[in-house]
Amino acid sequence: MKVAVLYGGTSKEREVSLSTGKGMIQALEQLDHDVMAIDFDPNQMEQLWKQLMQVDLVLIGLHGKQGEDGTVQGMLELMGVPYVGSGVLASSLAMDKSKAKQVFAMHDIPVARSQSFHYKESREDMIHSIKATFTKPFVIKPNQEGSTLGLTIVESDEQIADAVQMAFTHDSDIIVEDYVSGRELTVSVLGNKGDEQALPIIEIVPKSKYYDYESKYAEGGSEHIVPAEISEELTETIQHYANQAHRALGCETYSRVDFILSEVHGPVILEVNTLPGMTPTSLYPDAAGAVGISYTEMVQLFIDLSLEKYS
């Protein structure tokens, strides 16, 4: 098949996307597909349009805004070009943390208490409301951003103003939520609608105090324990929540669902990633590997599932 890989892009997660794209391109070449590698630039739409009209299928290796948020998916649907992964609505909902949390709560999936703010609101009122509502430590982060970019774990009142300012440099809306301490867990979900399955749960043990950007992407930044060393009953519960979250947002083909396992609250969902990282240190390929699916086989499986969906 002639398969395009959209990667790179213009978001603040460009470097991660370049690594994801590289992995996808190498896998497709090993599978003998005819690969068109496209470093996505929304300012070159005419050229992009001509390139994409030549391909049978698109793999999206983009992360962050203008890639993971439904915009590229909408462009491909307007063009009538088949692509791998979730559609416009699911991508947009998953990227909007505030809206996603509302959907999770509607489906009885445990979430951390949170409050959203818009940049046009009074900063003074905002900070007063945060102080009155949340007990330290708590989290301030952009509403639509990934890879912990713009996120602050607030441990003193003096941090609040700077944390709010930093979050607003990434997005026009921010979200403040209770900090839930516990074990970092993630569940990869695979399959077409009605036939999704949760892969083995991975526990992430960061080398630093928090699971930050460096812990996620630097070699040796964290240890992945797969399968996570938790009870069978708890495993089934968390995998059920992951499948439920994937379906509630309307995700397709694959996603990765992140949780905190709190000693007090049990599993608490953090977010759903519709385009999880596919770098050499990424979690989704690790989960696939745990059930005997190599990186290359995983990419072909994504293609097969997508062709089944479009047939």
Image (spheres, rainbow, N blue to C red):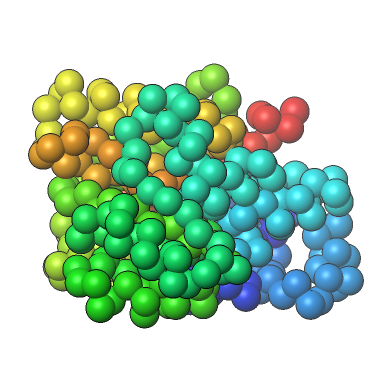
Q: Position of residue 91 (x, y in %)?
A: 60, 47
Picture layout, residue 50 above or below residue 201: below
The answer to whether residue 229 is left or right of residue 142 is left
Residue under the point 18% across and 27% down: 234
Picture layout, residue 143 above or below residue 109: below
Q: Position of residue 148 (x, y in %)?
A: 37, 65
Residue under the point 81% across and 76% down: 44
The answer to whether residue 32 is left or right of residue 290 is right
Q: Camera-side residue: 122 or 31?
A: 122
The reply to whether residue 213 is in sight is no
Q: How many marks?
A: 0
The answer to whether residue 260 is left or right of residue 103 is left
Q: Camera-side residue: 237 or 270?
A: 270
Q: Position of residue 260 (x, y in %)?
A: 24, 45
The image quadrant that residue 38 belongs to is bottom right
The reply to whether residue 104 is in sight is yes
Residue under the point 75% across and 28% down: 311
Q: Camera-side residue: 175 or 80?
A: 175
The image quadrant that residue 241 belongs to is top left
Q: Position of residue 101 (x, y in %)?
A: 45, 41
Residue under the point 62% across and 48% down: 92
Picture layout, residue 282 above or below residue 16: above
The image quadrant that residue 305 belongs to is top right
